[in-house]
Amino acid sequence: MSRHRLRTPLCDLLGCEVPILQAGMGGVARAELAAAVAEAGGFGMLGMVREPPEQIAREIEAVRARTDRSFAVNLIPAATDPALLAAELDVCLAAQVPAMCFFWDVVPEAVARAREAGCLVLHQVGTLKAAQAAEAAGADVLIAQGIEAGGHVHGQTSALVLVEQLARACALPVVASGGFASGAGLVAALALGAEGIHCGTAFLATRESFAHDHHKRKVLEARAEDTVLTDLFSLNWPPGAPVRVIGNALTDAIGGTLFGHHPEVLPPEVIAEDDGRPILRYSTDSPLRTTTGDLDAMPAFAGHSTTLIDDLPTAAERIATIMAGAEAALARLETGGRNERV
């Protein structure tokens, strides 16, 4: 069996070889990671949340210097000042990026701008209502994010249920997100009606990721039960935007009060610095390669799939492992063999 056995129509639409999408993680997913994923046959994304337009232009150019394969730029309209968002879109569309990926609330104007410029539009959603809004706005692909996901979590439904729900209710291709980091997970997602998987934690823990080594080590050490969903880290985002992180001293200190932390009442205390920019306690900034300061007090984003990750390979090796695991999972189903770790 070859990789083409698992090739889906989504691969043809996006211009990739395997149905594995790398999440556009803000700060973490820069050119080195997005290009490595694309060059290995997956679909890479630049995580450019609230980045200066000049930096976005440099990152797009850097991706193209490393690969001629297709990729996307991920922006979050609902969490970005409208003037900055307009400037970010200007840069992306002027550079003729192949695709845009949006997340959180559906902003039809942003989808329309991208579509009018000839971009494919992927939209990450956490509910059927949001999926229908994205579809009505003109999106081309839906990323169904389950509550198991790391980072900002849009809905409250398990990925296994949400993926099948959206596959049944929507005409667009659906990609499964939240807890997917293995070949068995890819096969499960395809069985539910998805045409691919969207992986964040799995690619955060790679050599090309721009995450700080401290963050990567925490992912390697953590299990699913070590993660918590909380709105404690809410500075920089609209209220009521929970994140899944690996528990730390800050989440331990609040005990069971994981929700109800409004960004306007959290104290603006500087705890770290990144490339000359101050980082506040309770902000959504995760530690990057360039970050110095109290890294333990910063959110270490990770989904439930952290329990499946115990190595730090290249992005290409991560993709190869997932595809080999998928082939092994299919073989087990065909032969009735026992489950082996792959």
Image: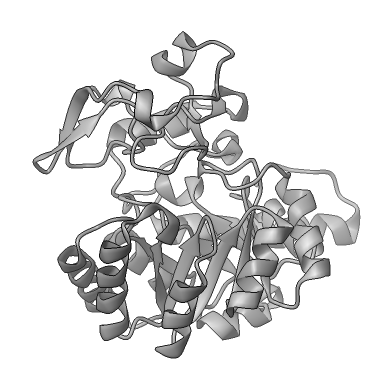
Q: Position of residue 180 (x, y in %)?
A: 62, 50
Pick out the residue farthest to the left. 276
Q: Is residue 131 left or right of residue 106?
A: right
**Residue found at x 22% / y 77%:** 65
Q: Is residue 293 left or right of residue 69?
A: left
**Residue found at x 52% / y 80%:** 14
Quarter containing the N terminus: bottom right
**Residue found at x 20% / y 67%:** 53
Colouring scheme applied when the structure was drawn: one colour
Instruction: Note whether 150 is above or below 21 in the view shown.
Output: above
Which one is nearer the viewer's eye here, 172 or 16?
Answer: 172
Instruction: Note whether 336 is above or below 323 in the view shown.
Output: above
**Residue found at x 48% / y 55%:** 318
Which one is nearer the viewer's eye here, 24 or 11?
Answer: 24
Residue 330 visible, this orientation: no
Q: Tell me the quarter of the picture where residue 67 sits.
A: bottom left
Q: Position of residue 39 (x, y in %)?
A: 39, 73
Q: Position of residue 59 (x, y in %)?
A: 23, 67
